[in-house]
Image (cartoon, rainbow, N blue to C red):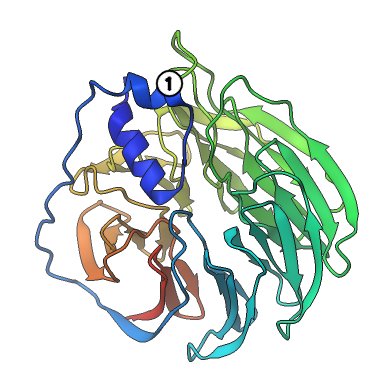
Amino acid sequence: MVDLKYVVKQVVRTALIGSIVVTLAACSGSARVRKPAELVPVSNQFDLVPVWSTSIGSSEPFSFHPTVAGDAVYTASHRGNVMKIDLRTGQKIWEASAPDRLSIGPGSDGRTTAVVTTKGVVYAYDDTGKAIWNMNLGSEVLTAPVVAGGVVVIRTLDNRFVGLDALTGVRKWTYQRQQSALSLRVGYGMLPIANEVIVTGFAGGRFGMIAIANGGLVWETPVSFPKGFSEIERLNDVTAKPSMEGDVICAVSYQGRIGCGQARTGNLLWFKDYSSYTGTAQSPDLVFSANERSYVTAFSVKDGSQFWENTQLSFRGVGEPLAIGKVLLMGDAQGYVHAFSQEKGEMLARIRHDSSPITAAPIAVSGLILVQSQGGKLAAYSPK
């Protein structure tokens, strides 16, 4: 049985899961509150040297992710600020102000940038920061938009995927999923591939591939199945963005399993019991994930055998992982960025980004590592 009180506390604070149901909080009353592990001193084997930093405004209580298109970073804040920032210098190129507070964003292809308000209204801006259209979807949105192939893909909390024309906002298609009896109130990450498809998780332990052009379901496959007697015990949604390396795609479910399969068909090569809401990262040979206790684990992409597990960050609320080169990076709830050896799992380095949670995966681009915290600090680091 998972430590429900800890899970609720962590996910509410980071906005990964705002509130599931009142019953979940009630049933967790007898569970213990887990104290985050004290940090073990690390002698950095490499440095993440600050190149630039800027404040973009807090995203709390939500979890905003920056996105990169061309030579610019696009970012947003809960208060409604939308910005384009020069990737190399950190200088603001333009800033727009949405008419209402934002729940998520942005998505951008460098031509159209889209954000969504807490009232479910999508606002789009051109690459000068000028507002070009808006669309009321009539439902809350916690998943970051994807802008690709001339389409803005929005995923709503009522299980709809909506494709809007990136230039006009005209609705091109809608794909409706069946509602589950109980699912996590959370942003479900979407992984765009080659401007043609997105791969994303669904409630009930399933994930699938959707065509960007018309919203058609290309394939769908289960990575796990509900277990237990109560609806809460049977929650096993694939909430985090799947990862992909080469022709292998991996996904993980909450209270379920982790598995890897063929990107073309979705057929799983292997799966094993595991639970995570922060997702996976891959190298050619390994897939990495952190469970709800913040134990970081590496599995073989080929057969799922466990290579290593590191428990030094237990209950520190680690965020989404990034695998780059020979290093695995992830932030935690106290604003630290930790670097692990992909091969052996030992801690290689640590920096303090700021004092607020880092839930979004770091981004590796053009020799830089970008990190954004929920407190609103966006910074670029150079590995040395």
Residue 345 point in image, percent of width and height: 25, 51
Q: Secondary structure at mark 1?
A: helix
Relative to residue 264, is residue 215 drawn left or right?
Answer: right
Residue shown at 35%/22% (left/top)? 26
Name the foreground residue: 378 vs 196: 378
Q: Residues within 10 Å of mark 1 (few under 14, many from 20)?
A: few
From what the image shows, is residue 277 above or below residue 350?
Answer: above
- Residue lying farthest left? 41
Residue 329 point in image, percent of width and height: 35, 61
What's the residue type where badge 1 is placed?
Thr
Residue 313 point in image, percent of width and height: 22, 49
From what the image shows, is residue 208 above or below residue 212?
Answer: above
Q: Which residue is mark 1?
A: 23
Residue 212 visible in the displayed image: no
From what the image shows, is residue 280 above or below residue 356?
Answer: above
**Image quadrant for the C terminus?**
bottom left
Residue shown at 45%/48% (left/top)? 15
Relative to residue 214, is residue 25 drawn left or right?
Answer: left
**Image quadrant for the N terminus?**
top left
Relative to residue 175, is residue 224 drawn left or right?
Answer: left
From what the image shows, is residue 228 above or below residue 194?
Answer: above
Asked where in the image residue 178 lies, by quadrant, the reply is: top right
